Image: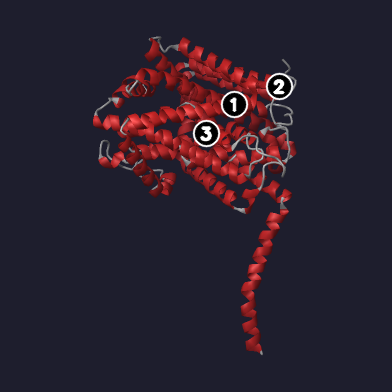
Amino acid sequence: MNFKNLDHKLFWPAICFTFLSLALAVFFPESSKEVAHAGMKWVTNDIGWFIQLAGFGALVFLMWIAFSRFGHIKLGDDNDAPEFTYATYAFLIFTAGVGAALIFWAVGEPMYYMQSPPMFTEAGSAEASQWLITYTLFHWGPIGWAIFCLPAVPYAYYLHKKKKRNLRLSNLLEDVIGKKNADGPLGYFINIIAIFGTLGAFSTSMGLAVDLIGSGIEKVTGLPNDIWLQVGLIVLFIVFYAVVMLAGMKKGVAKLANWCVYAAFALGIFILLSGPTAFILSYFFDSLSVMVDNFVRMSFWSDPVEKSGFPQAWTMYYWAWYFAYLVMMGIFLARISKGRTIKELVLTTIFFGSAGCAFFIAIFGSYSVFSELTGALPVLEWMNEAGVSMAVIEVINALPFGAAILIIFLIVEFFLMSTTMTSAAVAISMMTTKELDADADPDVSVRLIWALGIGAVSMAAFFMGGSIDTIKSMCIIVGLPMIFLNILMVVCLMKWIRKDHPELFKSTVTQAAKNNAEQAEPAQAELAKVEG
């Protein structure tokens, strides 16, 4: 295999830095845990308001640019047609952003909130029950998807409009930090931290998926969900990814995303129809209305007086986690957006991402809440005794035709995580490729070596045992500088648009001058009449 196009100066330091962080967490568990958790506490408690402001600001900015005159800018040449159908495009976005963690938390979050509810409500009260699905929808809703989408717009413009074939993050920021800094130590540091954020965040997401699938295999076959089964699953992910990558984006990744979404939605519809359908629909729309009514309040709730810790442990943690995925989501969404407009990229990501998550949260979350409230299933007991993964498996297994549905569920979860792994590997491969080809695809050899790298990091994280919490805390810390990098990318984007489309800015000035002139005419006429 040919690795000449791999940016070795970026690839090896990024991998080594990640493994060094893992090694420190293993060999100095108490010290590293103390430092990482102190940093995470500072980020969520002391700077949490800024993270909330950044998340809400991302949504506001994207809505503004989508519906402004800039929203019609095509990401590519005027004659560039979209590479994928609109449905496939939406499915690729959705599967890249959710993975197997969505259903895990669709069940887990409402159960946690049932024990420790938000907004000063009492556990077990009717008032508390209205927030269970509401906050889960919020955390997987428009702000989260806006954070994913924010870096995608400048990346897509840089790749398809400016025709740049090197996607190092430092290169995108040249117009702000200067070429000297972009090619120097500062740019190098930016690139390493950006890759580390993706590797660390993805490895812990992989941990959720592997534990969930391993728990399901244990339920079906009796095989223990131990380290060997989990490592075997990671190897299977890598092999499957290699097959998908060899098939290419259209025949491999796109078809996988399509079948993933079809199968997942079919599973959701089955649960909706076989479960308490009326309750699920009623509870979902009631929760949705509560979220809409309280959206701004939830976006900025920091609880500075009572200090319950809820917004810090959940909302601020989620937003920082999303920001850590800057490279993965930014580059992957940019890669598949050729021929789309800025408006299409923004609205498809935020709307379909949020709607897809809402579908699964409504069904799996509402079904779990109904089962616990009515005593039909001891969901909380399962979760407290064996963890969220086993609680999810038991909930699925309790459905009609539970054994068969559970097998289908495990296959769907495997495919969902495979699409997320593909997105991560493709994005980091593009960033560490010296020169992308005409289709903006990295060499197969680069994609495969990153698949091995991601798999190795994930395996190392598993062998760390409890130290994985240290890496999770470090990812949250990394999310903070990613916010500033996002802001710099937005500044660069507006500079590029001003340079490439000066007519959009001139028309604004012209229209403003025209409006001022029209307003001034009656006053001038009246003044002339008085003087006359």
Question: Disc 2 designates what residue?
Answer: 8
Dot 3: few (<14), some (14–19), or many (≥20) neighbours within 10 Å?
A: many
Q: Which quadrant of the rendered structure holds the C terminus?
A: bottom right
Dot 1: few (<14), some (14–19), or many (≥20) neighbours within 10 Å?
A: many
Would you say the residues marked 1 and 3 are in contact, meaning their CB atoms lie under 8 Å apart?
no
Question: Disc 3 designates what residue?
Answer: 94
Give the percent coordinates (x, y) of residue 335: 64, 33
Give the percent coordinates (x, y) of residue 481: 57, 36
Question: Disc 1 designates what residue?
Answer: 253
- Residue 262 visible in image: yes
Quadrant in the rendering for residue 82: top right
Q: CA distance from mark 2 to mark 3?
A: 31 Å
Which tag is nearer the camera, tag 2 or tag 3? 3
Helix, strand, or loop for circle 1? helix
- Residue 466 appears left or right of 200: left
Quadrant in the rendering for residue 361: top left
Front position in the image: 416 or 137 = 416
Helix, strand, or loop for circle 3? helix
Mark 1 or mark 2, earlier in chain? 2
Helix, strand, or loop for circle 2? helix
Q: Is residue 81 above or below residue 215?
A: below
Front position in the image: 260 or 490 = 260
- Residue 463 visible in image: no
Q: Which quadrant of the rendered structure holds the N terminus?
A: top right
Q: Is residue 463 above or below residue 132?
A: above
Mark 2 or mark 3, earlier in chain? 2
What is the three-letter code of the residue carrying label 2? His
Image disc number at residue 500: none
Which tag is nearer the camera, tag 1 or tag 2? 1
Q: CA distance from mark 1 to mark 3?
A: 13 Å
